[in-house]
Image: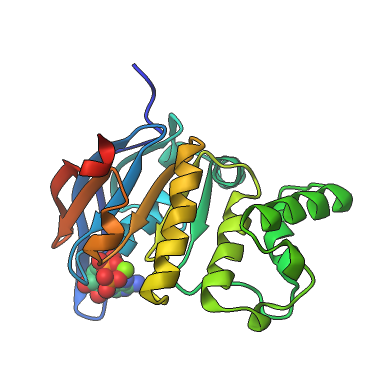
């Protein structure tokens, strides 16, 4: 059987608050296989971002296990984990999170700086990805010169720059109008057709309909897990 890209078992996260420990995630079990395209849904406060931040190794669980590409994340040293994360996954945020004083090309190339790639290769690779998302001609522009939808394309190019197997996106269309959202979903669909595993959070049924599987959270628990019509 194929190895899961992501496997979590009994995954929990509690936040320390003034009122005491708050359990935002209460023992989630889920396996995600190569090539899947999954929507994470559920009401505000149900734990979606908490879950995504754990999957993206942006935060650490309070309990349970997380295997990323077969490796037990909890047992890894910080450096090894950073390397695994860099080569395995790219993260896309609702607010794009581009650096405002850097050109689009430099924004896309930034993860390669951390990966120790030389300058020439960084430029070439960033340019290639900007071309892929249709923005090559804006390579030298600053982020504020392009639209929100274009900025999200740049953020997706940045997420792809280390050639990850997996893209994690937390409400990637949350700040975009419906037309622009559809364009972003078309791009995700193309990337998934190329074999990249995609996990995205959305509140919207028409966005989730693009995905092949829909997982729903409520009160920090996974309450449903269904294949969609897009899966057949
Ligand atoms: N850093 C934190 N400290 C304390 N509580 C937190 C923290 N982050 C999240 N929470 C709480 O944990 C719960 C889950 O939050 P989370 O952000 O995961 O929800 P969500 O499903 O992503 O919601 P939304 O749809 O609004 O983005 C919420 O009750 C939230 O208030
Ligand atoms: Mg959220």
Viewer-proximal residue among 142 and 114: 142
Q: Position of residue 178 (x, y in %)?
A: 36, 72
Left or right placement of residue 219 versus residue 108 in this view: left
Q: Is residue 134 visible?
A: yes
Quadrant of the displayed image that contains ligand 2: bottom left
Q: Residue at x 32, y 52 (%)?
A: 210
Q: Is residue 47 visible?
A: no
Q: Residue at x 25, y 34 (%)?
A: 232
Q: Position of residue 181 (x, y in %)?
A: 41, 67
Q: Position of residue 8 (x, y in %)?
A: 30, 40
Left or right placement of residue 138 versus residue 52 in this view: right
Residue 158, compared with residue 146, is above or below; it is: above
Q: Quadrant of residue 32?
A: top left
Q: Quadrant of residue 177?
A: bottom left
Residue 45, compared with residue 100, is above or below; it is: above
Q: Residue at x 25, y 81 (%)?
A: 18
Viewer-proximal residue among 161 and 10: 161
Q: Residue furthest front?
A: 179
Q: Residue at x 27, y 38 (%)?
A: 231
Viewer-proximal residue among 192 and 40: 192
Left or right placement of residue 67 versus residue 129 in this view: left
Viewer-proximal residue among 121 and 6: 121
Q: How many marks?
A: 0
């Amino acid at each position: 059987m194929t190895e899961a890209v992501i496997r979590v078992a009994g995954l929990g996260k509690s936040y320390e608050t003034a009122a005491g420990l708050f359990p935002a995630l209460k023992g989630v079990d889920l396996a995600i296989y190569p090539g899947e395209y999954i929507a994470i849904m559920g009401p505000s406060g149900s734990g979606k971002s908490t879950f995504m931040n754990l999957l993206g190794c942006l935060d650490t669980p309070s309990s349970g296990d997380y295997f990323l590409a077969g490796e037990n994340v909890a047992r890894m040293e910080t450096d090894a984990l950073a390397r695994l994360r860099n080569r395995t996954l790219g993260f896309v945020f609702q607010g794009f999170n581009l650096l405002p004083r850097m050109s689009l090309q430099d924004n896309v190339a930034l993860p390669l700086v951390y990966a120790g790639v030389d300058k020439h290769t960084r430029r070439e690779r960033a340019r290639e990805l900007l071309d892929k998302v249709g923005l090559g001609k804006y390579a030298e522009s600053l982020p504020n010169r392009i639209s929100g939808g274009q900025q999200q394309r740049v953020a997706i190019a940045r997420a792809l720059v280390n050639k990850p197997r997996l893209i994690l996106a937390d409400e990637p269309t949350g700040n975009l109008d419906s037309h622009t959202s559809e364009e972003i979903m078309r791009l995700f669909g193309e990337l998934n057709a190329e074999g990249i595993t995609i996990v995205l959070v959305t509140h919207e049924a028409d966005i989730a309909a693009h995905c092949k599987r829909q997982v729903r959270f409520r009160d920090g628990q996974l309450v449903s897990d269904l294949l969609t019509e897009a899966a057949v």
